[in-house]
Amino acid sequence: MAATVSRNIQLAQALPKRLQTFLARYPPQQLLPKGANPEQHKTPYQEETPNPFLPMRHPITGKWHDPKYSLRRQAELVKLARDHGVEELLPYTPKGTEVRLSKRVELGLRVKGTGVGETVKGHKHERQLVGKMEKRRKAMLEMPDLIREWKKTGKRNWTRFPK
Amino acid sequence: MAKKAKSRVIIVRLLSMAQTGFFYTFTRPRTSLPMQMLKYDPIIRRRVLFLEQKRKGGGK
């Protein structure tokens, strides 16, 4: 028994510092000895946020608080843990390998905006481009007439000036 | 207080009639006729009619 414990400690110390810190703050329930009540073995960190990877409602104010670890840091931790074979010790996270794979199965290589009934909004100048070109085209079609009229009227008598 | 004298020369903006929004800026004496000319519009790459834009606020 003692040999396995010391071996486990050795393995844990071989983990990168970042993972060690995380697991010290949020130790998984799997590591507790059998029969122990997980409610009684919580670190102060865990009492504050059971899962630091998920947004939490503040118990008193009822306001939503962001996850303690940003999605970027979550992904970094997951990658680190995966490389060292301890991913199952992390709490649930949307960046976990299983979640990512199931999402990939569900959505495939979907590109947002290309599905049925979806459109890409684009920039404002792109949305207005068609109307603008139409206006220009119309103005250019009328241009010879306008110039003829302007020449006939003469500079002195012309009154139609743009706003 | 006496009003400030209006300048004799004003700056005017000649707007392309091709609805491109392109314009030239010129100065002309305040008392002369509004400017109007055929000039090159680089956006549609053609010579089009340019007319002087009406100025804002009658006082200015």
Image (tube, rainbow, N blue to C red):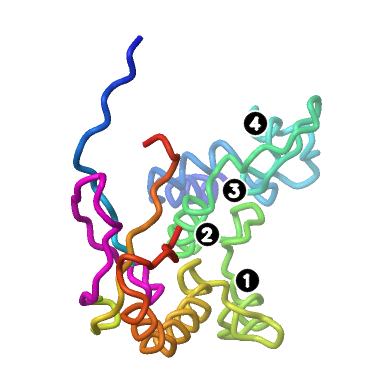
Task: Name the chain under label 2.
Answer: A
N-terminal of the two: label 1 or label 2? 2
Mark 3 vs mark 1: give the one in front. Answer: 1
In the rendered image, residue B54, in percent from the top left (x then y), is placed at: 40, 53
In the rendered image, residue A120, in percent from the top left (x then y), is placed at: 57, 76
Q: Amino acid at mark 3?
A: Met
- Same chain letter for marks 3 and 1: yes
* Residue hosting label 1: A98
- Same chain letter for marks 4 and 1: yes
Q: Relative to residue A112, is residue A39 drawn left or right?
A: right
- Distance between the alpha carbons at the discs numbered 4 and 2: 20 Å
Density class for disc 3 (Cα within 10 Å; few <14, some 14-19, many ≥20) is few
The image shows residue A144, relative to residue A135, as above or below, that is: below
What residue is rendered at 62% in x and 48% in y? A53
* Residue hosting label 2: A86
Q: Which of these two is toward me, A32 or B5?
A: B5
Secondary structure of residue under mark 3: loop
- Determine which quarter of the picture holds residue A69: top right
- Distance between the alpha carbons at the discs numbered 3 and 2: 21 Å
Q: Which of these two is toward me, B59 or A24?
A: B59
Task: Name the chain under label 1.
Answer: A
